[in-house]
Amino acid sequence: MAYVRSLGNCLRAGHSARFGESTVFEVGFHSCRYHLDEQGGLNLCGMSHTFRVVQGRTVEVAHASTDPLTFQLECVEAFVTSRVVRGFSAVTIENETGDLERMLAALGKPVWEATADDVDRVVGAMAADGLLASTRRRYVQALSSFHRFLITRRAGEIEALFGVRLTNPIDEFNASRHVGDDSPRLLPPPSVSRVAVFFDFLKERIGSARKYAPAARDYALFRTLYHAGLRSDEASKLEIADVYFGQGPFGKLHVRFGKGARTSGPRPRWVPMLDHLDLVVRWYLEDVRPKLPESAVLFCDQSGGAMARGTIRNRLRYLQDLEHCSPADRFSPHALRRACATHNYERGVDLVAIQQMLGHWTVGSTMRYVRPSETFIEDAYRSAVSDTVAFLQGDDDAH
């Protein structure tokens, strides 16, 4: 940092420069010249490299491209490299990079020149073209991740080369749900009564459906998602051999392809079949599964293969259409998993037990799933008071 101290000494000694003027000073054993550019930055020249002082630090810019789009492409490549280093899968990186490239192309300008209005324009056009909210959210998320990378790694270079200080074009008004820590990421899970109404509908539908086996399979599948707290992908990969009625007091499901954390790979776990789920699964295996094509898959489609995660989601949407439920009463397969966590927590199940059941790496992840009802505090208070009164009455009877 000798050149920074020398420059500081020159300025403190009374040397000054206006735009277009230069001042000579020494850096180590080299003679160096500095001048103010159009953006008010201090350029240091005369050495083997060129530097520019930005926000109290000096950034080497000699070997960086001065073409905005070329430099942005270099930044994208560096961003992809960082994803590889962090251990993201090749599929994840490919999908995210594709979303980012399409978003940058739609903006039509370097990302450091993009404003919130530009993001509004692009996302609004996507909505007008009929792109799903989940697709638009992916594009915004990719842009947000790339922008955070630039702020951390390339902010100095961008300001040195283009005179632009990075500001995030994604704010609280154009960030889709799930983007950023301050956004309302999760809607409340369906209530106990709402889930009960839905399962009653599925049960009644079994008797009137044109095809008995698929309707009965749907009932058993969504009961399993809720009572066992499984992810759709985990349920789709269950096999008949993964059902163990003799394990524990309720029987257990062996989830062999549980979601891994970062690069850990699949994390298997044993999930108890609570709330009479064992009776539902036993009925399904004895009465329903033989009517479906023969295969090892537990919840198979009509060809005997495993149901894809998207198929399960679309199936639930179709069933809710048949139910004619209001938009406020609709929920996703993942919402059933969050409902499992919330409802078990509300009735007093230990949070660590819920964590193990859901296959979360930390209790903090489980806490983000738990969304108690509006009357949870009052219900907990009444329960505590009732327990205290019962204890005191028992103590009085003993005396």
Image: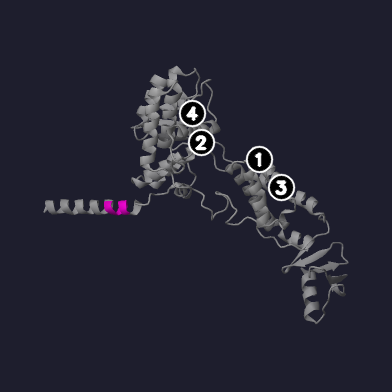
Which image quarter is the C terminus in? bottom left
Amino acid on which disc 2 is placed: Gly
Amino acid on which disc 4 is placed: Leu
x, y percentage for residue 93?
66, 42
Q: Residue 95 carries which label?
A: 1
Q: Give the range drawn in magenta.
A: 378-382
Q: Distance between the residues labelled 1 and 2?
A: 22 Å
Q: Distance between the residues labelled 3 and 2?
A: 37 Å
Labels 2 and 4 touching (C-beta < 8 A)? no
Please tell me whether residue 121 belongs to the stretch shown in magenta: no
Q: Which badge, 3 or 2, is on the more N-terminal residue?
A: 3
Amino acid on which disc 3 is placed: Ala
Q: Which of 175 and 53 is in front in this view?
A: 175
Dot 1 crowding, Cα within 10 Å, few <14, some 14–19, many 20+: few
Residue at which label 3 appears: 106
Q: Which mark is residue 238?
A: 4
Dot 4 crowding, Cα within 10 Å, few <14, some 14–19, many 20+: many
Look at discs 4 and 1 and give the one toward the viewer.
Answer: 1
Residue visible at 77% across and 71% down? 4
Which image quarter is the N terminus in? bottom right
The dominant secondary structure in magenta is: helix
Q: Dot 3 lies on which element? A: helix
Amino acid on which disc 1 is placed: Asn
Q: In this view, does 82 lie above or below 218?
A: below
x, y percentage for residue 227?
40, 36
Q: Which badge, 2 or 4, is on the more N-terminal residue?
A: 4
Residue at which label 2 appears: 258
Q: Which badge, 4 or 1, is on the more N-terminal residue?
A: 1
Q: Which badge, 1 or 2, is on the more N-terminal residue?
A: 1
Q: How far apart are marks 2 and 4 (CA)?
A: 10 Å
Q: Is residue 53 above or below residue 294?
A: below
